[in-house]
Structure formats: C-alpha cells, structure tokens
Image: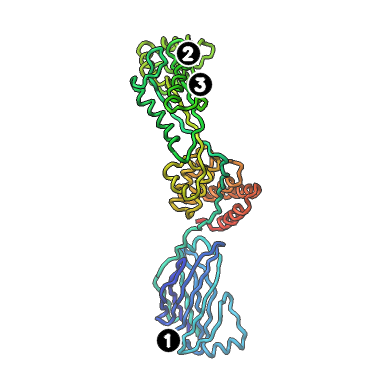
Amino acid sequence: MKKILYILFCLLPVLNGNAQTLYKNQVRIEKESITRSDDNRLTINLDIVLQTNLKIASNNVATLTPFLEADGQTKALPSIIVYGRKRNIVNQRNHKNFENTYTVIRRKQTEEQKISYLIQIPFEAWMRTANMKLNIDICGCCDILEENSGELITRLNISPLKLQPSIAYITPQAEGVKHRAVEGSAYLDFPVNKYIIYPEYRRNTIELAKIRATIDTVRNDKNTTLTSIKIHGYASPEGGYANNTHLAEERTKALVDYVSSYYNFDKKLITSESTPEDWAGFRKFVATSSLDKKDEILRLMNDESLDIDKKEHAIAKLAGPQGYQYILDTCYPALRHSDYTVNYTVRGFNLEESKEIINKRPQLLSLQEIYLVAQSYKPGSEEFNHAFLVAATMFPDDPIANLNAAAMEIQKGGDITEAKKYLAKADPKAAETLNNLGIIAMLEDDLDGAEKYFKAATESGLSIQADANLKELKKKQNYPKQ
C-alpha cells in the first residue's frame, strides 16, 4: 500500500520560530533556518523529528522529500528514506541505492528520531516567493490509500541582493598657511563731481559701517590675523570717461584714507585700484532688464570700435528719454561702488576645537580639519554627513571636497543624483573618482560600465577598494534578475 501526504512548512530568509508538527502530529520540524548567501546559494537547515507516535510497518518504507514550489516551477530536494525493520534488512541484502537521497535510516518504533537536514542549492529568482512542501510517501505496495495537501504557512520572501561597495574617500593635505578672505561691496554717495567722503551723507553711515564690520570681524577674532585690505573703486558710465577716471581714482583714495585713519592702519596694509566705468555691471543689468531695445543696446555695448563716450551717448539715444531715465535711476547708482577684500590668516585647530568651530565659523577650518571632524564620527551618522556637506560648501570648487561629498552621498544610499553632481566637479582621472563612478554604474545596473571603472581604478593604484568592488560586481552579475 502507498500513502502520500503533502505538507507545507515555513520558508523564510531566516527562520528561528517555534517547532511545528506535521503529518497528523507525527512529524515535527525544528530549528528552521533558510538563508541566501552572497554567492547566491540557498542554505536550508532544519531538524526533522520523527515523533514516538509515527508507526511504519515492518515491511514499509517512508520517503520524506522536501521541495520548493512557485508559479508552476518545482525543485525537489534530497530525500530522507525511513525503512521499517524487515524492509531495511531486504535493502541491505539487495544493496539498493536511491537517487537524490540525503540519508537512509531505520525506523525505531516508540522512539523519537531527529534528522539534521542541511543542504545548499543554487538560488533562482522564482524561489524568492516559493512555498516549501514536504512530501511523505509511505509505501508497502502500489496502492494509494490517501492523498492530502497541507495548508500554506508562509512564503519565502528573500530581500533583493544587498551590495556592500567599497567607497573611496581622499584625505586632504594640510594647508601650510590658512589664507582666507572676506569680500563685500559698499555703495557710497558723493556730491556730484566730488570725492570727499561725508560719513553722514545719505546712506554713507550704513555703507561705512558695513566695511568696518567686515574688518572688525577679522581684527576681533583671536584665531585670525589681518594681513591686507584691497579696495577697488568703480564709477558709472554717466558723463565723460576722463572725468570718471579721475572720480574713480580719487574716491577710491578717499576710502583708503578713511579706513587708514579710522583704524590707524599703515597705508601699506591697504592696496587699491579703480575702474573708471563699470561696463561689466552695466551689461549684466541690461541683459536682465525689461528695456524695450535691450538687444540693440547689448550689441552697441559689445561694439569695441566705438569710442566709449560716443557709445554711452548712443545707448542713451537708443533707450529713449524714458528708458534712459530708468537707467539713470535704477542702474547707474549700483555701478558706483567700492569693492573691498579683507585678507587674513587663520591658526590651526585641534579636533575638539574643529568640532566646535564647524557649526559656528566653518570658513576658518581647512579642508583637512573638516575631514578629520567627519572621521571622528560613525560613517553614515548625521554628524559625519554634515561635515562633508560643510566641506563642499566651504570649498565648492575643490576636487577633493567634491569627491568626498559624493562618497558620502553614495554611502547614504537612496537617490544618487547629488553624488553625480559632486563627482562632476571631482578630478576625473583620480582613482577614487573612477571607483565611485563604478559604484554608481553598478547601482544603476550598468554592469559593463562599472567593470571598466573598477579596472581603471585598479590601474590607477586603488587596488583594495576597486578589487573589492569587482567582487561585489560579480555577485550582482551572477544574481538572477528579478
């Protein structure tokens, strides 16, 4: 006689639940653990316990076959053969072998027998949501006495392949001397054709205070040393070029005298230059204005063959009375300005000082000091990420600052759009840049491109990270597509 029973039991990525009983409470499943390894192998580890109430007649044999089933696909696993006493003797005499067999045992009546079942099989994509079933086939002859299916307990729900890329950062070099500068613009008012500064005249009180505040910020900081001040004065195109040249020079000198006398500075500390007419600023204003004939005006501005005074008169005529009045009232006042740059040096800071300063005056820190702050925190932490963002903000054009910011964004996971933006400003030939571009390509499933980047990074000297990423890439290449 032959008895067949299909029984389902749990299949999870990692199972450590309570024991479950099957086949009329005569078979027990314990210590279930099913995992997928990095090399895409499915490891099934469980204990199958034949309980004391499981009776197998002396002439019968039971075949326990686990198998996976999903979407019409099945995968039979090695079977466990359990003989009754007489059938076991006959098998030993005949030396009968079974294909795809895990183990062969003899049933010991009234005793619990535990089979530790441990196998590995190649993982296939369809197995992610498979059911595992246990087929118990009890045979004595060819007759089938009963055939039943158990209830579904759970499905396999294996998470997608999790890559562990080796992200490359660059340690910045220390600055020998930390040179810094703060810039500003002041819009001083002078009476027509005059170049004497009247501190109370119109908005001069406010504009002069801006300059002093910038200088005081440096002078009053114990961590900084003022090294020089540069003042660059501009006049507007209104009026003759020769007169504007004189006004720009004298008004710039007047501001130098004011700053020198206010602080009792040696005039050697201050350098100055002047531009008679700020045509660059004039051009920007017109380009963004709503003037009716701004295209024609821009063409006139770009005509280098015209005398500069004739050009200004031609623009006034082309703009018309209303348009030119708009230029006089709105544009020209902004073109009469004094740009100033306060240069200074900053002392070096230890780690604890840097941690405090990064949130107050990060511009005082060097790129290396900010990097060391980041490295003092756990990778991926809020403080770690913040430090690299500060570095990219303070040093927006520095290739290393951008490379490290990109590495941080990759490490965060999720959207890598920001990482791409930062990498666009990193050194394209640097091994670290190539490595991190390879990671992005791998995450975006451009596996061929990723391999090229990693190999190029290896050739450029970054063998440890790039070789590790090539191994990760191989896992992804071998992983079944979902």
> Mark 3 and 2 residues: CB-CB less than 8 Å, in contact?
no
Q: Nearer the viewer, mark 1 or mark 2?
A: 2
Q: Nearer the viewer, residue 157 or 202?
A: 202
Q: Nearer the viewer, residue 478 or 320?
A: 320
The answer to the question of whether label 1 and label 3 lie on touching residues, with beta carbons closer than 8 A, is no
Q: Where does the image place residue 27, in percent across and percent down from the top left? A: 44, 80
The furthest residue to the front: 264
Q: Nearer the viewer, residue 86 or 206?
A: 206
Per the image, label 1 sits on a secondary structure element best described as loop
Residue at image mark 2: 246
Which-is-in-front pick, marks 1 and 3? Answer: 3
Q: Nearer the viewer, residue 422 or 391?
A: 391
Residue 273, numbered label? 3
Which SS class for mark 2? helix
Q: Amino acid at mark 3?
A: Glu
Spot occupied by residue 30 in the image (x, y as percentages of width and height) = 45, 77
Name the element at disc 3. Answer: strand
Judging by the rendered image, the residue that carries numbered circle 1 is 53
**What residue is drawn where x is 48% and y is 23%?**
232
Number of residues whose C-alpha sits closer than 10 Å to that of mark 2, classed few (under 14), some (14–19) or many (20 or more): some
Crowdedness of circle 1 by 10 Å Cα count: few (<14), some, many (20+)? some
- Res. 335 image quadrant: top left
Q: Earlier in the sequence, mark 3 or mark 2?
A: 2
466 horizontally vs 59: left or right: right
Indicate left or right for 18 with 426 as reference.
left
- Disc 2 residue type? His
Q: Are marks 1 and 2 in contact (CB under 8 Å)?
A: no
Q: What is the C-alpha distance between the residues marked 1 and 3?
A: 103 Å
N-term-proximal mark, 1 vs 3: 1
Residue furthest out toward the right: 459
Amino acid type assigned to the residue bearing label 1 in the image: Asn
